[in-house]
Image: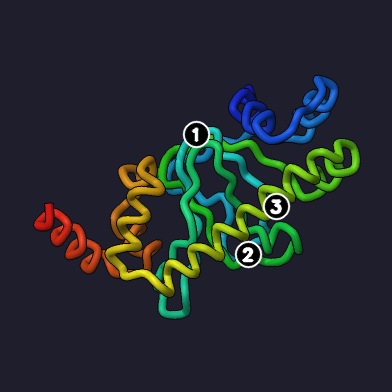
Amino acid sequence: MQMNTESFLNYIDEHITLSEDEKTFLLTKLNFRKYQKGQYVVQQGDVCRYENFVVSGCLKTFFVDNEGDEHVIMFSVENWWSADLSSFFTQTPADYNVLCLENTEVIQIGFEEIEELYINIPKLERFFRILFQNSIVAFEKRLVRNLSMTAKDRYLYFKKRYPQIEQRVPQYAIASYIGVTKEFLSKIKSQLILEQ
């Protein structure tokens, strides 16, 4: 299967500069995978084997609690990454599911391959450290928003921050992401229409 690496290499180039030899070596450590809408990239309880760079499509990361309720943690679209990081780094069972909301193409880096890349291209260790730092900061800020903002303000923030996602995911998933029921999200949206 032909791997579309242009967006991936452009993304890398935005953060670090690799030589042509380094790029060539990097490409030998990648997998390209196509998933259909509704297919799982990672399932709760399985070990997360890959970091996934989204070439095209949309993914939803979520977990299902003991009552069977779904809790959406994040969405990932083009040029974003998706994985259960805890499972990936520790190679233990995943707490999260990663599900395709659209037909999706990803570039994958396996656990052993990423360690090999760190050794052979030290700049990539810095690159991924920055990505992981940014991810931690984003999660912490989201936690603060969830604890300090009203549901309406969380929805407005989501609309403003992720306009490219809102039209691509089901409303129940957005409701779960901002921590409300889909019925309550409908009320928020109705209220916003009335306020215009």
Q: Residue 140: x, y in percent?
A: 56, 65
Q: Residue 53 at what x, y percent from top left?
A: 61, 40
Which residue is outermost to the left?
194
Q: Earlier in the sequence, mark 3 or mark 2?
A: 3
**Label 1 or label 3, whichever comes before in sequence order:** 3
Residue at x 68%, y 35% (from the top left corner): 15
Which residue is pictured at 17% across the width and 57% down the height?
192
144 w.r.t. 167: above or below = below
Mark 3 and mark 2 residues within 8 Å of each other at the beta carbon: no
Nearest to viewer (mark 1 / mark 3): 1
Residue found at x 70% / y 48%: 130
In the displayed structure, does residue 46 sit left or right of residue 111? Answer: left
Q: Amino acid at mark 3?
A: Arg
Q: Which residue is mark 1?
A: 56
Q: Which mark is residue 49?
A: 3
Quarter of the image where one finds residue 26: top right
Q: Label 1's element?
A: strand
* Left or right of residue 107: residue 183: left
